[in-house]
Amino acid sequence: MTQPKKTLLPPVFLFEMIDHGYAIGKSLHQHGIKTVGFFPSSKNFEYFSRLPYKKYVTPQNNEERLEQLISAAKEFSTKPVLIINNESFYPFIYQYLDELKQYFSFELPEKGILNTLLEKDLFNEFALKNNIRIPVSVEVSHQEPVNQNTFAHLQFPLVIKPKYRSPDWAAKYKFRKAFVAKSLKESVSICQELFEVVDRLVVQEWIPGPDSNVFFCLTYLTAQGQVLETFCGQKIHQHPILLGNTSSAIPTKNKAIEQETLRILKLSGTSGFCSVEFKKHEITGQYYVIEPTVGRIDRQQYVSSVSNKDVVLSAYCHLANIPLIKKRSTSDQYIYIEETLQLKSFLDYRYYKSKESEKIRQIIKHRKLKFMHLTKKDPVTSLLVMAGLVKHFLHYLIKGKTIEFQEDEITKELMAYQPEKSEAYQTVPTSQL
């Protein structure tokens, strides 16, 4: 197919253009696509980027937010593509879905389908019905009494994480995604503490294994069920280690995960950006579905955007109703790195004297580095990222640990945790994995 003229390319609105939203904007910008960035604050370091065609600070009020989006869209003669990177915007998007559809091109699943995949109790029911292997979990709310009986049927250790990471959670816990409990008493105590900042929590059995046992499959499904592209990847490190966000990852070929991902998503009837994350059990070698993501891009999307299987670019061309933009062929011998998170992950592993800290060194020797933020085309943002890296590294040299790091005995235990081969796991069997 012939690449369309750059002047005909509809703009893309990145809602929001921080973290992986920035990385996707950087990738699309390379194809001559105008990016309009929305930011939580003018203090975000990505706000100083010179890549966006226009920049806006997003209002907190829904009506003002809608007015801002529509006003910005009217400045263009072609219908912009809207890409969402934050699940906290779901209520806003669905509330004003009809109005937004008039001005933007995007696809979302029906709200009931989205709830089925994201609501832990509904997804558990869906998994049981459709032979999907998942770790046993429960969802708890601050409106209901939580006591030791709530978790009596679960096997420890347990991972406790928020149903949705609210602004209050981000303000208090920043990059932390979850806590771990090793007893009934501790489970109740952690839940009571976390209910001070969030209303709902997911409590899930821990699947043993290091960060590199986490795999993911990204895809985009049209409203008609067409698969535009799929991409499989493997995490190397996370931050916080074991329970955090992707700090480094590599592309991988895993037909079983790809097939299971598409089976799950097609059975659900979802559409738009979607992915499924798996974890490989360290002892049994079985893959467990940790969580699906639907309706938005996630942090792993940049891993695909620098590959030959660019899920976001394919989705953009589909939504913009233009021929597929051809990319220059590239090697899959690379490693994606989120600079700040990877530095902290590496140093935290060194603090714990874990051999996992050396894993990335071995991979870097044989692969090209691909960064989330660093680029010669955006010097101010890159310099701000570099300054942050220097700050974290100097703090480690002086204090012997990274900023905001707190030694965690449970993390030590999880890194060393080796269940018996006969240890029974309450799971749903599946023939695929």
Image (spheres, grey):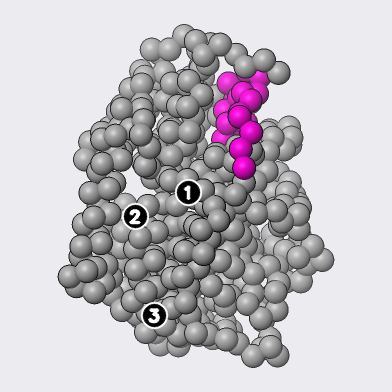
Q: Name the residue under label 3.
A: 353
Q: What element carries label 2?
A: helix
Q: Which of marks 3 and 1 is nearer the N terminus?
A: 3
Q: Mark 2 points at which residue?
A: 340
Of labels 1 and 2, the one closer to you: 1
Of labels 3 and 1, the one closer to you: 1
Residue at x 56% of width, y 35% of height: 312
Q: Position of residue 315 (x, y in %)?
A: 60, 31
Image vertical order of residue 7 relative to residue 351, above or below: above
Q: Position of residue 18 (x, y in %)?
A: 36, 41
Q: Is residue 317 magenta?
A: yes
Three-letter residue code for mark 1: Leu
Q: Distance between the residues labelled 3 and 1?
A: 25 Å
Furthest toward the right, the residue is: 431
Q: How far apart are marks 3 and 2 (CA)?
A: 20 Å
Q: The N terminus appears in which quarter of the rendering?
A: top right
Q: In the image, 211: left or right of 128?
A: left
Q: Name the residue under label 1.
A: 369
Question: 397 or 136, which is in the foreground?
Answer: 397
Residue at x 63% of width, y 77% of height: 282
Three-letter residue code for mark 2: Thr
Q: Distance between the residues labelled 1 and 2?
A: 14 Å
Residue at x 45% of width, y 85% of height: 413
Image vertical order of residue 314 relative to residue 341, above or below: above
